[in-house]
Image (tube, rainbow, N blue to C red):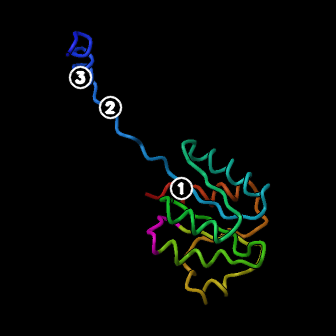
Amino acid sequence: MPTARSGAERSRRTLFPPLPRVQRPRLLLVEDDADLAAHMERIAHSLVPALTVDRTTSVVEAKALLEVRDYALVVADYLLEGRESGITLHAVCDDRSVTQFALMSAFAVRDVLENDGAAACPFLPKPFTTAQCREFLRPLLAAP
């Protein structure tokens, strides 16, 4: 049995329809150095405060996350603990239509990137300053 209150609630819903859910942009950070990952997360949040950052330390975990979530950007260390290579995520990201994929490394890996077909991906050499990391992430996070 409808009441006056339920009728008022119904008209309020008509006048003020629910707002659409806003999808927050997501960054997947694949880095086995916890301090460096936390630092990069802070820098990313300084650029895009609404950014959701997922951090993982392995390629296996990253692949699992890529199966269930959409990411605007994936940044992976070239060589992770256990000799895993973040470069293997490049093909997975292409398959999943990730907007951007980038690598970082303390090694000079430009030759390897060219051999693995990832020469066009952005590359951040380690060590880097906060300013260098901010300038590296800024255009990647601004990409549509």
* Magenta highlight range: 95-100
Q: Kindly identify the residue that appears in the image at 73 percent across and 52 percent down.
A: 38
Compare residues 62 and 134 and report the one nearer the observer.
62
- Judging by the rendered image, the residue that carries numbered circle 2 is 18
| Alpha-carbon span between mark 2 and mark 1 | 28 Å
Q: Quadrant of the N terminus?
A: top left
| Alpha-carbon span between mark 1 and mark 3 | 36 Å
Q: Secondary structure at mark 3?
A: helix
Q: Secondary structure at mark 1?
A: helix
Compare residues 5 and 40 and report the one nearer the observer.
5
> Magenta includes 98?
yes
Image quadrant where residue 126 sits: bottom right
Q: Secondary structure at mark 2?
A: loop
Q: Kindly identify the residue that appears in the image at 59 percent across and 69 percent down.
A: 102
Tag nearer the camera, 1 or 3: 3
Image quadrant where residue 108 sits: bottom right
Compare residues 110 and 29 and report the one nearer the observer.
29
Rate crowding at label 1 as few (under 14), some (14 to 19) or many (20 or more) other CA atoms within 10 Å.
some
- Judging by the rendered image, the residue that carries numbered circle 1 is 141
Among the two numbered marks 1 and 3 on one chain, the one whose residue lies closer to the N terminus: 3
Rate crowding at label 3 as few (under 14), some (14 to 19) or many (20 or more) other CA atoms within 10 Å.
few
Q: Can you give x and y, in whole percent of width and height, for residue 66 in the image?
A: 53, 65
Task: Identify the amino acid type marked 3.
Answer: Leu
Q: Kindly identify the residue that appears in the image at 72 percent across and 70 percent down.
A: 125
- Judging by the rendered image, the residue that carries numbered circle 3 is 15
Q: Can you give x and y, in whole percent of width and height, for residue 117 in the image?
A: 55, 85
Q: Kindly identify the residue that appears in the image at 64 percent across and 71 percent down.
A: 60
> Magenta includes 144?
no
Asked if residue 75 lies left or right of residue 2, the reply is: right
